[in-house]
């Protein structure tokens, strides 16, 4: 018998993200499910900035903007960024791509 999906047992929200190095050496990161982005001087700084933006966005969506939550989560990025994500996935999977990173951000679903 197949396992049943039970959304009540979810403990975290996993969001697909990617980052790429710009020509000037800075990094651009994007969260696809929430259409949020950040910039940073390094991949680590940029990922931290994006995590902070996601945390703030989700906190506001479930508190101050709760009546609009269905419009705020998910809020998918435009098609262009999903295609970039697929391109980056291919680069990371099939060749050495130091200028591209794909990653997930896991956000807890329990109140902090």
Image: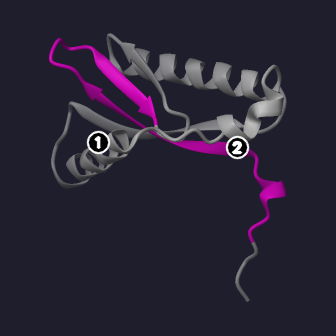
Q: Around disc 2, counting alpha carbons within 10 Å, would you say few (fewer than 14), some (14 to 19), or many (20 or more)?
A: few
Residue 94 position by quadrant: bottom left
**In terms of depth relative to the viewer, which is nearer, 35 or 19?**
35
Numbered mark located on residue 4 in the image = none
Marks 2,1: beta carbons within 8 A:
no
Residue 78 appears at what percent x and percent y? 41, 39
Left or right position of 94 against 28: left
Foreground disc of the pair 2, 1 = 1
Q: Which residues are magenta?
A: 5-31
Residue 103 appears at what percent x and percent y? 43, 40
Vertical position of residue 62 compared to residue 45: above or below: below
Left or right position of 23 against 26: left
Chain-order first, disc 2 or disc 1: 2
Vertical position of residue 11 compared to residue 29: above or below: below
The residue sitting at 37% across, 13% down in the picture is 40
Residue designated by label 2: 12
Residue 21 on the magenta span: yes
Residue 73 on the magenta span: no
Vertical position of residue 2 compared to residue 22: above or below: below
The residue sitting at 24% across, 24% down in the picture is 21
Numbered mark located on residue 84 in the image = 1
Residue 56 appears at what percent x and percent y? 66, 19
Residue 45 position by quadrant: top left
**In terms of depth relative to the viewer, which is nearer, 48 or 54?**
54
The residue sitting at 81% across, 19% down in the picture is 64
Left or right position of 69 against 99: right
The residue sitting at 66% across, 34% down in the picture is 72
Quadrant occupied by the C terminus: top right
* Label 1: which secondary element: helix
Vertical position of residue 6 compared to residue 37: above or below: below
Quadrant occupied by the N terminus: bottom right
Q: How is the image coloured?
A: one colour
């Amino acid at each position: 018998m197949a396992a049943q999906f039970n959304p009540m047992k979810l403990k975290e929200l996993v969001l697909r993200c990617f980052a790429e190095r710009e020509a000037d050496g800075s990094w651009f990161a994007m969260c696809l499910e929430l259409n949020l982005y950040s910039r940073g001087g390094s991949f680590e700084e940029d990922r931290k900035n994006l995590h902070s933006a996601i945390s703030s966005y989700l906190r506001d969506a479930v508190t101050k903007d709760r009546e609009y939550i269905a419009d705020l989560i998910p809020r998918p990025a435009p098609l262009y960024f999903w295609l970039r994500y697929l391109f980056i996935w291919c680069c990371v999977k099939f060749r050495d791509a130091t200028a591209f990173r794909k990653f997930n951000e896991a956000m807890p679903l329990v109140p902090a």
